Amino acid sequence: MQVMITGANRGIGLEFVRQLLERGDTVFATARQPDEASALGHLADLYPDHLTIAALDVTDPSSIEEAYQEIGTQTERLDLLINNAGMLVRGERFGILEHDTLLNTLHTNAVGPMLVAQRFYDLLKHGAQPRLINMTSQLGSIARARGGGNYSYNASKAALNMLTRMTALRIKDEGIITIMMHPGWVRTDMGGDSASLSVVESVTAMLTVIDALTLEDAGRFLQWDGSELPW
């Protein structure tokens, strides 16, 4: 399987890379600053024939184009695209919201993934049972909204959910399965040390769900364990 992952330098993205390589897939791992991604470099040493590392800043259209050109010279198809890159700014509350934080978070978490998906669409179309996975969060569920924190992050994930749903319905006829996936509360830099899931547990479960997807699942909002979340 030919797989591309954004935000692959650490946490969930890095674990996706590791597990996919272990099972024999070919992986195109992208990060904003790949030269500083030592863990990816270690995996490249272990799997030189199966791992390509490319620079990609999802907020920069020229970077998206350069990554497309680089990856497009090495493969004619993608069977799986995992839009994992994202950001979270803590400490927000009404009254101190900042213009730049709101816009930058929306750009990184919603606009960027959609522009990546749009540019790499041509490669997905040629994939074997192609799947587009946009990593979202249960915090993007409007029905579950309870508090007044994480304005930028929650709103950006709600926006990503809508964009993903619209895209899923648009490209389903091309045979591309598009879903939103919440990885659970995971012990990463973003999730914190108190989170209930390890990175290994989350990614292992998500790959089980991803591998079993069919066109009937297109447009769904799923958790790491395959259960569905409300909009």
Image (cartoon, rainbow, N blue to C red):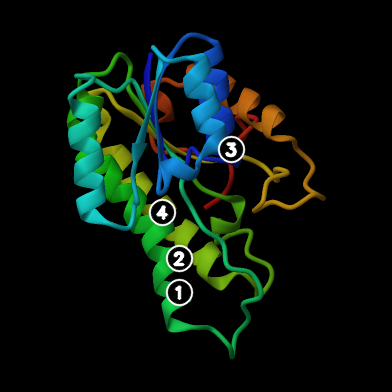
State which mark lies toward you, 3 or 1.
Answer: 3
Q: Name the residue under label 2.
A: 105
* Residue at 54%, 36% in the rendered image: 38
Is residue 173 shown to the viewer in this render? no
- Residue in the foreground of this view, choosing between 36 and 22: 36
Q: Mark 3 points at which residue?
A: 12
N-terminal-most mark, 3 or 4: 3
State which mark lies toward you, 3 or 4.
Answer: 3
Label 2 to label 3: alpha-carbon separation: 19 Å
N-terminal-most mark, 3 or 1: 3
- Residue in the foreground of this view, choosing between 77 and 142: 77
Label 2 to label 1: alpha-carbon separation: 5 Å
Q: Label 2 sits on what residue type?
A: Thr
Q: Label 1 sits on what residue type?
A: Leu
- Give coordinates of residue 124: x percent, y percent: 25, 26
Cβ atoms at labels 2 and 1 below 8 Å apart: yes
Q: Mark 4 points at which residue?
A: 160
Label 4 to label 1: alpha-carbon separation: 14 Å
User: Vertical placement of 149 versus 117: above or below?
Assistant: below
